[in-house]
């Protein structure tokens, strides 16, 4: 008896989104390494935490597909983009990835609505809300950098921005604390 409660179309879209979240994690990890190398440890730490959060999102998609009787497919993850040329380019890249992710989330919501897959539609509402927070966070990064002076910011302004992001609340679990039950 087939116990898969997902249509092939929805199952593929959810698997694709799982992989998209993993890619976003790699992008933010790459940006974090770039920031760390430039001496912005606070910004790097912020980006590393964001990378972990994106990985956690991918796990949510994986678990949902498995719980609905499907089998998510892990695809090759594209390489992250080249290092940003500046903090502005870095923060703009974060925002662009979040907007792109929101668009993909909305597509799945539309598909679930069209197929009357209410379980998936309900599951996706968490991500709709999360993307509001993610886009706001990314937009706030851009605003903070602009207030600091953008790419012409003084060392003192960048130091303050870096310190502010270092002290931002850490609500993302660290990778070394992950377990099979708590990815």
Image (cartoon, rainbow, N blue to C red):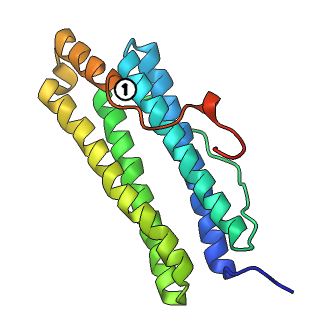
Q: Tell me which corner region of the image, top left, top right, bottom left or bottom right, holds residue 17.
A: bottom right
> In this rendering, is residue 83 above or below 102?
above
The answer to whether residue 82 shows anywhere in this view is no
Q: Residue furthest front?
A: 181
Q: Count the labels in the image.
A: 1
Which residue corresponds to mark 1? Answer: 85
Question: Which residue is painted at 21% across and 29% down in the image?
Answer: 145
Q: Which percent across, then down, holds residue 155?
A: 21, 10
Q: Is residue 169 left or right of residue 47?
A: left
Quick one: SS at disc 1? loop
| Left or right, 47 with reference to 145 | right
Q: Which of 42 and 20 lies nearest the eye of the viewer?
A: 42
Q: Residue at x 54, y 52 (%)?
A: 57
Q: Residue at x 51, y 70 (%)?
A: 123
Give the quarter of the figure containing the N terminus. Answer: bottom right
Query: Which of the 4 quarters of the picture holds residue 75?
Result: bottom right
Split into 4 quadrants, where in the image is the C terminus? Answer: top right
Q: x, y percentage for residue 111? A: 51, 80
Question: Does 116 sit above or below residue 173?
Answer: below
Residue 59: x and y, percent? 62, 52
Q: Position of residue 129 (x, y in %)?
A: 36, 61
Looking at the image, residue 148 sits to the left or right of residue 45; the answer is left
**What residue appears at the point 47 percent right and 33 percent down from the top-left corner?**
49
């Amino acid at each position: 008896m087939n116990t898969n409660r997902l249509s092939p179309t929805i199952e593929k879209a959810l698997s694709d989104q799982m992989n998209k979240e993993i890619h976003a994690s790699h992008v933010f990890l790459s940006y974090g390494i770039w920031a760390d190398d430039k001496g912005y440890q606070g910004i790097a730490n912020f980006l590393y935490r964001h990378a972990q959060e994106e990985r956690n999102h991918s796990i949510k998609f994986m678990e949902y597909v498995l719980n609905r009787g499907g089998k998510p497919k892990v695809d090759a993850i594209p390489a992250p983009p080249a290092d940003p040329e500046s903090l502005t380019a870095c923060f703009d890249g974060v925002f662009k990835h979040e907007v792109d992710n929101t668009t993909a989330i909305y597509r799945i919501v539309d598909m679930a609505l069209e197929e009357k897959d209410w379980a998936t539609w309900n599951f996706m509402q968490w991500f709709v809300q999360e993307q509001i927070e993610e886009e706001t966070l990314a937009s706030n990064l851009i605003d903070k950098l602009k207030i600091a002076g953008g790419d012409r910011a003084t060392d003192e302004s960048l130091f303050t921005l870096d310190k502010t992001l270092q002290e931002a609340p850490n609500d993302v679990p660290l990778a070394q604390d992950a377990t099979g039950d708590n990815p």
